[in-house]
Image (cartoon, grey):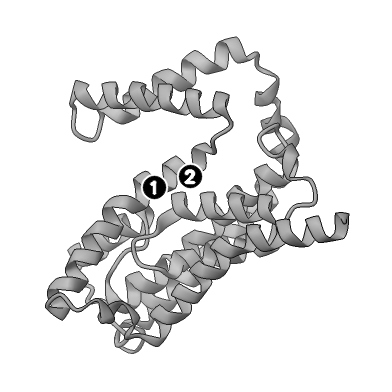
Amino acid sequence: MVWTSLVGLLIGVVPGAGAAIASFVAYQQSRLWSKTPEKYGTGHINGLIAPESANNGVTSGTLIPLLIIGVPGGATAAIMAVVLEYHGVNFGPDLFETEPMIAYGSFAAMAFTYVLLGLLILPLSRYLARVVVVPTVYLVPILIAFTLVGAFVPRAYLFDMGIAIVFGIIGYIARRTGYHVAAILIGIILGPMLENYFLRALRISQGDLGVLFSSTLGNILWAALVLSLSTPAIRWWLRARRGR
């Protein structure tokens, strides 16, 4: 719970990442470092705690890029940005000096809210958890209905509902064939962002790919990416060596 919350916090600091990416990354990392990864996807408690902890941790992190550079890190921060801009708040490092009540007040209010929620939700958790005893035959139609409504509402296109149904079928096939659905979802979320920022970087550098490696922070992220991709192979090699 603690370290996946920190994962969510760090991802929240990245502009535009949001809670969805934090949840999937935390789940994947929790499964990667688990001693019982085969239990994930069967209701394993660690697989439930990891994404929810990251989902909560990301909310605090999204305030950092919002207040410092004016770029919201997620949907909640985007709503806050619209409201604050409507009231004439100018984002930037100077905000902490010119409007300290707004800048520091957001963090103070969030800390107080977490304490209040802890006092209220923990005693009620045993009663709220009873929703899991509702038979699946009743829950599934309700969840599908809400999913289709959620796909329809943003643009009011029936086509979007069709897309939701198609991806539901793809997800079902992926689960039946052992492919990780989270990988598909991360690709859908990050794909357009990757293409957009990649083209923007090439425009700024006039086609020079070296700009992708011109930042110290960027190079650290590249190293983290290589480490993340190579870790499963290294762990498999170490297990195989121990087995021999």
Q: Which mark is residue 183?
A: 2
**Is the residue 104 above or below the residue 136 in the image?**
below
- Residue at image mark 1: 187
Residue at the top extreme of this rendering? 137
Where, quadrant-wise, is the C terminus in this rendering?
bottom right
User: Compared with residue 53, is residue 132 higher up or lower down, i.e. above or below?
Assistant: above
Residue at image coords 50%, 60%: 58
SS category of the residue bearing label 1: helix
**102 vs 63, nearest the viewer:** 63
Label 1 environment density (alpha carbons within 10 Å; few <14, some 14–19, many ≥20): few
Q: Quadrant of residue 124?
A: top right
Q: Image point 53% across, 66% down: which residue?
A: 9
On screen, residue 75 versus residue 135, left or right, reads left
Residue type indicated by callout 1: Gly
Residue 203 x %, y %:
13, 72
Residue 115 seen from this side: no
Determine which of the numbered discs, if any, sits on residue 221 in the image: none
Tag 2 and tag 1, C-beta contact below 8 Å: yes
| In this view, 65 is above or below 59 | below
